[in-house]
Image: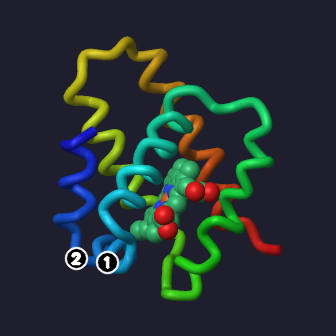
Amino acid sequence: MDRFYSLVLKDKELRQFFDDVDAKGQRGSMTSFLALALEMPRGFKDLQLRKAHSPVFRRGLRDEHVVTLIKYFMEAVREKELDEDVRDQIAMNLECAREEITREE
Ligand code: HEM
């Protein structure tokens, strides 16, 4: 998790979005992110991912940022020795999340 976190914060494009989120808030959303990646929660839609990110969108978040974030996460995941099907599941979950986040109204 720390590995993922540091990849994100090293990225100039992504870092800006976290600038005004306090460290505790960042940890919180990173933890939810992880939970979401690992096991897609049942009422996934209820999480209102799109709504949660709309302030971030107003500040210029674009689909490519989400793609980059997912790339970093998968990079960190690859460094762990996980079964391939677990990795595939994570990638699939994040892809669904991306669609949800970037979905038009
Ligand atoms: C598949 C991609 C993503 C997933 C699954 C995800 C997941 C989440 C979750 C679960 C939360 C917490 C929502 C809540 O508290 O109700 C959150 C908040 C947040 N996310 Fe994401 N996120 C994704 C992409 C991104 C990207 C690309 C950025 C910016 C580069 C971003 C920036 C934020 C910020 C700034 C918050 C709010 C933190 C706060 O104010 O406490 N997210 N995200």
Look at label 1 and name its amino acid. Asp
Is the residue 25 above or below the residue 42 in the image?
Answer: below
Whether residue 65 is visible: no
Name the side, left or right, on which 58 lies relative to 14: right
Disc 2 under 8 Å from ligand 1? The reply is no
Amino acid type at circle 2 is Lys
Which residue ends up furthest to the right in the rendered image? 105
Q: Residue at 28% x, 38% y: name it.
A: 1
**Percent coordinates x, y for residue 71 in the rendering:** 35, 50
For label 1, count other residues whose C-alpha is less than 10 Å away and answer few (under 14), some (14-19) or many (20+): few
Is 41 drawn above or below residue 55 in the view shown?
Answer: above
Q: Quadrant of residue 73?
A: top left
Hey, which residue is sitting farthest top in the picture? Answer: 83
Q: Which mark is residue 19?
A: 1
Answer with left or right where residue 43 lies relative to residue 1.
right
Most foreground residue, 84 or 19? 19
Secondary structure at numbered mark 2: helix
